[in-house]
Image (cartoon, helix red, strand yellow):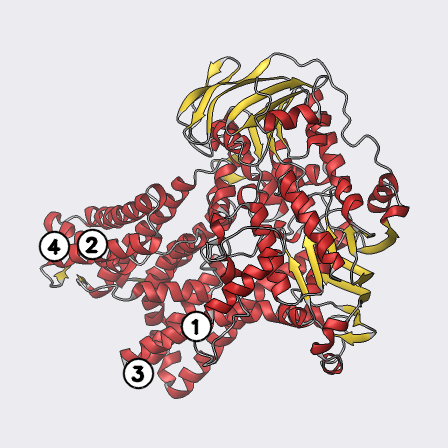
Amino acid sequence: MSHTSKKTSESKKALSEKNFRYIILLAIIFILVVIFASVKPVFLQFSNLMNMARQVSVLAIVSIGMTYVILTGGIDLSVGSNIAFAGAVAAIAVNSTGSAMIGFVSAMLAGLIIGTINGSMIGYYGISPFMATLATMSLARGLTLTISGAAGIKVKDTVFNFLGQNSLGPIPVVVFAVFVLYAASFILLTRMTFGRKVYAVGGNINAAKASGILAERELMKVYMITGLLCGIGAIITVGRATSAQPWAGLGLEFEVVTAVVLGGTSLLGGKGSLEGTFLGSLLVGVLANGLGLMDVSPYIQYIIKGVMILLAVLIDEASIKIREVKKIEKNSENILPEEYNKKFAFENIKTAKVLKLTNISKEFPGVKALDGVNLTIKRGTVMALMGENGAGKSTLMKILAGVYKKDRGEIKIEGVPVEINSPLDAQKLGIAVIHQEFSLIPELTVAQNIFLGKELYEKNRLLLDKKSMSKKAKELVSRFDMDIDVNLPVKNLTVGQQQMIEIAKALASDAWIIVMDEPTSALSEADKNSLFKLIRELKRQGVAIVYISHRMPEIFEIADEVTVLRDGRYVASEEVNRIDESTLIKYMVGRELKDIFHREKAEPGRVVLEVKNLTKSGVFNNISFKVREGEVLGLSGLMGAGRSEIVRCIFGLDPFDKGEILIDGKALHIQKPLDAIRAGMGLVPEDRRKDGFVPLMSVRENLSLPSLPWINTWGWIDRKTEGEIAAHYISALEIKTPSHDQALSNLSGGNQQKCVLGKWLARNPRIIILDEPTRGVDVGAKAEIHRIIEGLAQKGVAIIMISSELPEILGVSDRIIVLHEGTITGEYDAASASQEKIMQSATGVACT
């Protein structure tokens, strides 16, 4: 299939999935219309339809603002009270001055004031949207009752009442107003930088900030816009009733939220559309009008609206489940019946010795993640699973863990077919997976975490047997030679200790197969040695270990066998003592990679960045260094040495207490990432999921995110330029994606990292900070990233690189600064540096 046809197919699938909800909403609206028309024929009379249009107009208009708010992950409970307040202010203004224009301005200004208060509290003071808008809801209602004397304020000005009362021909004026506002808002959300920033803030506020978006300002904007729309809603409301009522808008916030959520906007933020909101508003309006004609009690109507909110959530879940079922059913001719699990009694798991996966295949939209993969796991062995990012390792292990369901293939234990349809099935079959991101709950104790989901109860089966759980947890932990109080919260443990607790959780489930995904990625050398000691002990006890890692030395140190995947296909399985590193790399990437850490080092130019006496109390002290054009400065040190904290302060993500940052010899006041970006900096953060990208946004949108200020005209995004940026860096960095419109969350970790790097390369930075740029990526991607670093240095870019891998920091850097407990304890040039010297400085043994 050609790239173009793949892209077209992917776009059609995405469009189909997006339209699924709209079809459901339209079907529900149609059913309601048929029901109401059958019961009350007057429902379809033109006069009633126009009356319904007037009724739904305020809801539809305010729902625009609520869509913006919920897209950012917030909520605005003050909209109903804001309409009443703005209406009362406008009525007083019109009656006092006799000017409809002053009334219009007063309504908009009053709504804007409430919106600004909301935006300030939420955006700049960090108050939760629920609490902030709950407060202004009460404030606005109280002010309304006060200024109106708790009575309606009559408004006779025909000009002011025009929007709520008059028609253009047979169509109410307000209908035209609704369509104009939706058209303008649609453009604002989908074609302007404002909309892109709204989606980014809601999708991942940390990554949005790190990309230079002023999240506080964007939050302020969405609440101010909602306030303005409430002002318009107030004008319509007063015009329809020819009076401002103190209890106007009561309960409107619930109707608005219902309409927006029914339309598909996620309460978690980052996902939604105004098309869906419009349909949701129409559904709510049709229901309210129909129930009103049928004289249904307002109390019953509240119940129905509550059911509708639940329905919105259920539709959302159903659409996800249906899509997943379709994926599973596709090419599912070899799926085995549940009876197979019954044939293999779970109590016999303790005697099982071999698990085989045969011809396993799995597809996602536009991506064949696995294609006929075979794997054999045997008791008492450490089997390394290797491959480039995107090779299918994680997908295969998620099938084994019951997170994903295979499309085709067979899983057998001792020759008997079994089905793994859920994590519970995997647990019953003695399979445990320890993911790279721990699944521990920080506030719970060690014992509670170990037995979470498999708690022990006292004889009455009502109370937890905490004593027995603590005792058994202590027995499990003692196997690791760790002196840990199992009644302490997990948050008090080191990363290495938390890793051991994850393994203890697996052993508590009587697992005979334990999958470890990049288990050493965040461990110190000492913790790694402790982990390997434990793995050897588990192997001696007959536990099978599946070890996923990109670190070659670890594979040769701990594994017995290695299986390699490439592009979702099985490549080879070998005993580790019969294979060398170069052959293994060739299996993984389909070619030889020589001198992975080698680069041509040139003479650096003039000083670009200088840091003087940078200090953050309790984190690092008096940090000073310089970086020159074309130079790679490596920052090394153990975890907790302050490396990442320093570069986050330099880039404006975190504040520092004192010190100076100079570019070209001039002091720069960096208070936020946008200041650093404007000065020519870029940052590839340590945690790409937290600070690097917005998962729900596409590859294209992520690649262009920091460039938004430079690829727009008066806020209008230049889609042609944006597409060219995406196409260039997808090609240049060899990002594996079926389409630039693919959500970045669907890509492998290595390709995600390339996107994070690409978005900064698109800015042509003078200074780029790379914090663990190759963590969790395969050797092929690592070599590509190193070539990119070399190319940047040759172009004169000043580079700061942090890496926990000593061979990498030695091979890539021109100069290395070593940190220990927040202070510089060593500085070496490439010629004089060695692993021994760096480790001495990192542990504080040899301070300079």
C-alpha separation, residue under disc 3 versus residue under disc 2: 32 Å
Q: Nearer the viewer, residue 814 or 372?
A: 814
Residue 310, numbered label: 1
Q: Amino acid at mark 1?
A: Leu
Report crowding for label 3: few under 14, some 14 to 19, many 20 or more residues within 10 A (C-alpha).
few
Q: Nearer the viewer, residue 87 or 135?
A: 135
Counting residues from the N terminus, which is met first, the one under dot 4 or under dot 1?
Answer: 4
* Mark 1: secondary structure: helix
Q: Marks 2 and 1: in contact by CB < 8 Å?
A: no
- Residue 665 x, y percent position in the rendering: 50, 12
Q: Where does label 4 land, which residue? A: 147
Counting residues from the N terminus, which is met first, the one under dot 4 or under dot 3?
Answer: 4
Q: Residue at x 78, y 32 (%)?
A: 596
Q: Marks 2 and 3: in contact by CB < 8 Å?
A: no
Q: In which quarter of the view is residue 20 placed?
A: bottom right
Counting residues from the N terminus, which is met first, the one under dot 3 or under dot 2?
Answer: 2
Counting residues from the N terminus, which is met first, the one under dot 3 or under dot 1?
Answer: 3
Residue 296, numbered label: 3
Q: Nearer the viewer, residue 275 or 480?
A: 480
Q: Does residue 482 appear in this view?
A: yes
